[in-house]
Amino acid sequence: MGAIGRPRRSCLAVPGSSVKMLDKAKGLPADQVFLDLEDAVAPLAKPDARKNIVAALNEGGWGGKARVVRVNDLTTPWTYRDVIDIVEGAGANLDCIMLPKVQSAAHIEWLDLTLTQLERSLGLPLGGIGIEAQIENAAGLVNVDAIAAASPRVETIIFGPADFMASINMKSLVVGALHPDYPGDPYHYILMRILMAARMHDKQAIDGPFLQIRDVDGFTEVAKRSAALGFDGKWVLHPGQLDAANEVYSPSQADYDHAELILDAYEHYTSEAGGRLGAVMLGDEMIDEASRKMALVMAGKGRAAGM
Ligand code: GLV
Ligand code: MG
């Protein structure tokens, strides 16, 4: 499986300011960790957080997890120093840089060029470090197609619901929860917009955080909505949310088994017919090339999850 398709059911946030949490995260069952330099870290703590993150990446012990560092956004004075210190310090032990509050393709182009410069000067494989783009305001969403297309380094498009809700003046403080005054899902358009841009450009679509960390049922309910649409995973702010994320963004055992059955049956019946049949029956269900494709997606996710 290529880098783009690596599992990201659970993307665990780890504040770069906490050496203890950085260490603990290594042993947790997350598909991805992102070591944060942005909103979880106070301005005065950012220089030390950069050092903690470099040390934690170079120490190793992350298993097969995707190792990502979230830098500060390009309206702050910190972004370039974040990128340079992290990549110069630990570029060989890093999978992606996450850029928050991306508003245009230019933000991604800046990061792409900066990473290329760093890779050239450090002798790292060119294009080896990926980019994760957080969509957190109206400009980001309106430009999301161009953002997804801006560099082959982009691996994920991420919904940042807390900043997004603040930026559009949404009348709610509970991220992802349905709103009593709105007769539908207030996030549906945003999620679908991000998902279409991601799929058009072959990127992963990742749902953002759920802040009520003790309410695992609430987390699960919100996660199920984006998983149902086709999102690949979700942020996890607390280890207590990890199992729920890994489960919600994996197929159910029944769906996985059925997908494998469709693939076997389709292959078997169509080859038995010498390639002359496009649609065949599996019990009471008609399966054709489109069913095979749906089954392939489901089976692929299940296999990646070790089912
Ligand atoms: C995440 O960064 C968010 O703003 O929800
Ligand atoms: Mg944010």
Image: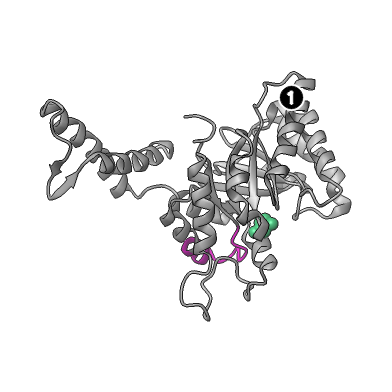
Looking at the picture, how far across and down is residue 74, in whole percent?
Answer: 78, 48
Residue 268 place in picture, x, y as percent: 16, 31
Label 1 near ligand 1 (CB < 8 Å):
no
Could you tell whether 57 is left or right of 194 in the image? right
- Outermost residue to the top: 123
Q: Residue at x 20, y 43 (%)?
A: 287
- The range drawn in magenta is 209-221
Graded by Cα atoms within 10 Å as few (under 14), some (14 to 19) or many (20 or more), the crowding at tag 1 reads: many
- 297 or 306, which is in the foreground? 297
- Is 23 left, or right, of 9 in this rendering? right
Q: Position of residue 189 (x, y in %)?
A: 51, 62
Quadrant of the rendered image containing residue 168: bottom right
For ligand 2, which image quadrant applies? bottom right
Image quarter of residue 64: top right
Placement of 109 over or under 159, stated as above or below: above
Q: Is residue 56 visible?
A: yes
Say which element carries label 1.
helix
Could one spot residue 237 in this view of the protein?
A: no
- 58 above or below 187? above
Asked if the stretch drawn in magenta spans residue 197, the answer is no
Instruction: Classify residue 56 as left or right of residue 66.
Output: right
Residue occupying image coordinates x 54% and y 31% = 3
Q: Which residue is mark 1?
A: 119
Colour setting: one colour
Query: How many tags in the picture?
Result: 1
Report the front residue among 13 and 77.
77
Type of amino acid at the residue the image marks with label 1: Glu
Q: Where is residue 171 shown, x and y percent of the image? A: 63, 76
